[in-house]
Image (cartoon, grey):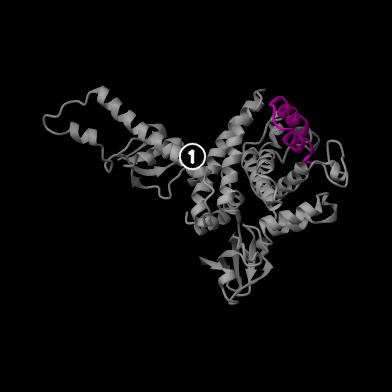
Amino acid sequence: MLKRIETGEVELGMFIHKLEGSWFSHPFWKSRFLLEDPVLLGKLHDSAVPAVIIDTERSRRAANDQANRPGAKEVPAVLKRGARRAAARATGATAADRAAELRSVAPRTMVQEFGLANRVADKGQRAISRAFLEARLGKTIAPSAVEPVVDDIFASIQRNAHAFNGLMRCKRDSEFVYRHALAVCALMISLARTMKLSPDEIRLAGMAGLLIDVGVGLLPVPLSSTGDFRDIAPEVLREHVILGSELLVASGLPDPVVQACLQHHERIDGTGYPYAMPGETIGLLARMAAICDTYDQLVDDTGGHPALDPAAAIERMAEPDSGLDPDLLARFTETVGIHPIGSVVELESGRLAMVVAQDESDPTRPRVRAFWSKAQQTALPPSDIALANYFGEDRIVARADLAALVPGEFAPLRERLFTGACGG
């Protein structure tokens, strides 16, 4: 018999039939299994899964089995509590191991890093949502609340330069304002690494990316149900940089982070706000944030906003009237690749494919996942192609026009393609 219970009520020996919510909310790659590992139980309890469907007939509980035997006695409550404490100690020990794993910088492949990047994103979203909520309630932001998020993302990017950014590019099920904060943080860290800034400067860049839009929650208007602030009237939205920077000053955040929040909508041609500052009078982190913030908003297609293909977004940002620092934009392009993850390209073979990983030795030939036949106008079984190792049998010939070639909304397919390519 199937029964729905709260996640906190799950115990060892239960057969999990279904985990409610998106798969991004939990640490498991399968939804049906017998839960016998205290480590997995701890992961489930720590996850954002709202509820669980269990199969009572397939569950195996030692206590119930013992109680149903002839002559069995009730297990004393003190022993039950002792067993729970023992399980908690086991879970606690592995929690420290899991935290250490997230801070490791040992190199990993895209597939290996995907699971860790997903955990970092989930943990970071919870921390940022709490910080932004406290800001809306008039409280300051404790630096200690956001520093671990930056460190976790920094470590993920050191393990694999593209996994976390790729995940944030394709992940769609979390509230826009928090997903955007994590994405800009990761892009800032990646850009700072490309620029060979010091580790302390890289962390400041990440913190700036995380907090540049904290003032949105302080505006005198409600956010949409998705947290997407792009629909707020421009004359109202522009106040978020003042409100956010004032909050960060009161919170004791470093001056470069405050400056980035205040100036990330300034443009080097003097057309930005709030002070129409020109050129290099705009701080370095603010000029970096302007690029990372603009890019993520251009490629995000949630909330009914049409999105640009990542490669098309780079082209748009390179136009002379963008007001973005051209030298930093060149470094950003180097960072995300000529064909950024999530880009859809047309291959010489007539197939459409999505870029799912970069090749560090040859940025012009990334790893792609083919999914569509242009000639037959039909879906193909997804297949991964490492173009750098394909020995000239196929190559990228153009950027694909999805609107003309693939019917329906592409975003859900993008998420499935990326997840499948990373072993999810």
- In the displayed structure, 45 sits above or below 418; it is above
321 or 250: nearer the eye? 250
Q: Which residues are magenta?
A: 241-265
Q: Which image quadrant for residue 253?
A: top right
Q: Specify whether residue 251 is painted magenta.
A: yes
147 or 270: nearer the eye? 147
Q: Specify whether residue 16 is painted magenta.
A: no
The residue located at (54%, 58%) in the rendering is 417
The residue located at (40%, 32%) in the rendering is 8
74 or 57: nearer the eye? 74
Furthest toward the left, the residue is: 71
* Residue where numbered disc 1 is placed: 99
- In the displayed structure, 81 sits above or below 152; it is above
Badge 1: residue crowd in 10 Å (few <14, some 14–19, many ≥20): few
Tell me the amino acid under the disc marked 1.
Ala
Is residue 379 shown left or right of residue 83?
Answer: right
Q: Is residue 220 visible?
A: no
Q: Which image quadrant for residue 243?
A: top right
Q: Tag 1's secondary structure? A: helix
Is residue 17 shown left or right of residue 160?
Answer: left
Residue 409 position in % (x across, y down): 61, 55
The residue located at (69%, 48%) in the rendering is 192
Residue 119 position in % (x across, y down): 51, 43
Residue 53 position in % (x across, y down): 38, 40
